[in-house]
Image (cartoon, rainbow, N blue to C red):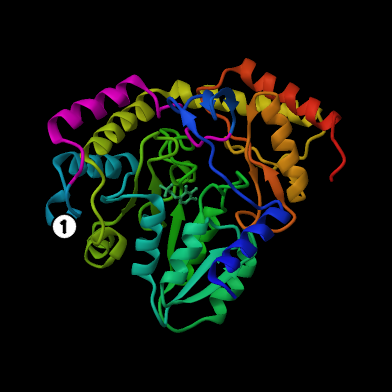
Amino acid sequence: MNKYAHLHQVLAQRQQQSLYRRARITDGPQQPIMQVNGRPMLAFCSNDYLGLANHPEVIKAFQQAANQYGVGSGAAHLVNGHSRLHQQLEEALAEFTKRERALLFSTGYMANLGLVAALAERPDTIYQDRLNHASLLDAARLSSAKRVRYPHKDTQQLAKRLEAQSTGQKVIVTDGVFSMDGDTAPVKTLASLAKQHEAWLIVDDAHGLGFLGETGAGLLEAEHLAQDDAILMGTLGKALGTAGAFVAASADLIEFLIQTARPYIYTTAQPPAIAAASLASLKLVQTENGRREHLKELIQVFRQGAEQLGLALMPSTTPIQPIIIGENAKTLAMSQQLEQLGILITAIRPPTVPANTARLRITLSAAHSQEQVEFLLAALEQVIQSQTPIP
Ligand SMILES: *Cc1c(COP(=O)(O)O)cnc(C)c1O
């Protein structure tokens, strides 16, 4: 087949299955009411859970650091791209998460690739929850280790699989808060299984960091898991409102990653100004508990309202509150109807989620007001009532 004909065939198939994706163009900052494709929209799909992406202190820190350090970091961390700001951020993250050390990565995707592939290679085995984030699944593919998946949160099945294996190291990997479902992993049980089997446990807390736990240090703080119980991977582009990611763990493990994690070694360090912005937002996370409190109230308001509308909610106590629709076409149609009402919620479809579980992934932010959440509920009611038959 002609090489372009092949591309066109794949694209046409995606269209037919309502799986085609396209980016919207935004103007201005990340905030509840955003300019999207030239039009103001009330967005419920951002991961800026605490509303820090556009916070004046964070912007100021970024600007000041850019004046002092310029823009590009110029090189990888192990060459001459590791600025004092990067160092300070790593120290602050280690202190925040109560771990001996933290190591910065340019993105969460890369942190997962680096961490998982460094810890496991043939003849080791990687055990993953079926609903883990794509970057964790890809990380296992990058590694030469054996790959085992277990049903969502099914620790009994995991236990069986751990018992069946004997050669090499074992690495258990889980999302902390599942990114498309909003529920949390049974990390306490996972940690005790890990201990029992001499396995590493990696928790990707991209969506728990900043929100869960007494000081916002995430699911591991909320569940009182210590450094030896679990390796923490956290991202800075979500609740912290900036960009990048880190691994927090024992000094030995971090030293091991510095020497072996290829996505750490072979990439340009993030701009120092981003590290400065992250330092500023980390301070806000730690000092402004009110954001988390307000967000918890909004979650309550949303769940109560959605229940009254008869919507099927997920067992989620986090800002991720998806509504499962099922069919791709129907989910897309509902997302488009909401868009006409001025509300932006993306239709999440396979392969991001399993087949027949397409959903409206609603996310709430501390930057939303209660009135905005009520407006969302009214719009959802209207969309449900006017449900057009599927073409
Ligand atoms: C967003 C996300 C990542 C990737 O983080 P980036 O910094 O956006 O690359 C990794 N894991 C989970 C669970 C995520 O939701």
Residue 293: give x, y in percent of width and height.
Answer: 52, 24
Residue 172 lies, with reference to residue 76, above or below; the image says: below
Residue 346: give x, y in percent of width and height.
Answer: 62, 39
Q: Residue at x 46, y 27 (%)?
A: 27
- The residue segment tinted magenta is 45-73
Q: Residue at x 55, y 30 (%)?
A: 37
Q: Nearer the viewer, residue 278 or 300?
A: 278
Which quadrant is home to the N terminus?
Answer: bottom right
| Residue 47 included in the magenta stretch of the image | yes
In this image, 214 relative to 343: left or right?
A: left
The answer to which quarter of the image holds residue 160 is bottom right
Residue 240: give x, y in percent of width and height.
Answer: 39, 35
Residue 62: give x, y in percent of width and height.
Answer: 26, 29
Residue 99 lies, with reference to residue 213, above or below; the image says: below
Q: Residue at x 31, y 50 (%)?
A: 106
Q: Residue at x 26, y 45 (%)?
A: 270
| Residue 161 included in the magenta stretch of the image | no
Task: Please identify the residue farthest to the front as the structure is shown.
Answer: 2
Residue designated by label 1: 78
In this image, 174 relative to 351: left or right?
A: left
Q: Residues within 10 Å of mark 1 (few under 14, many from 20)?
A: some
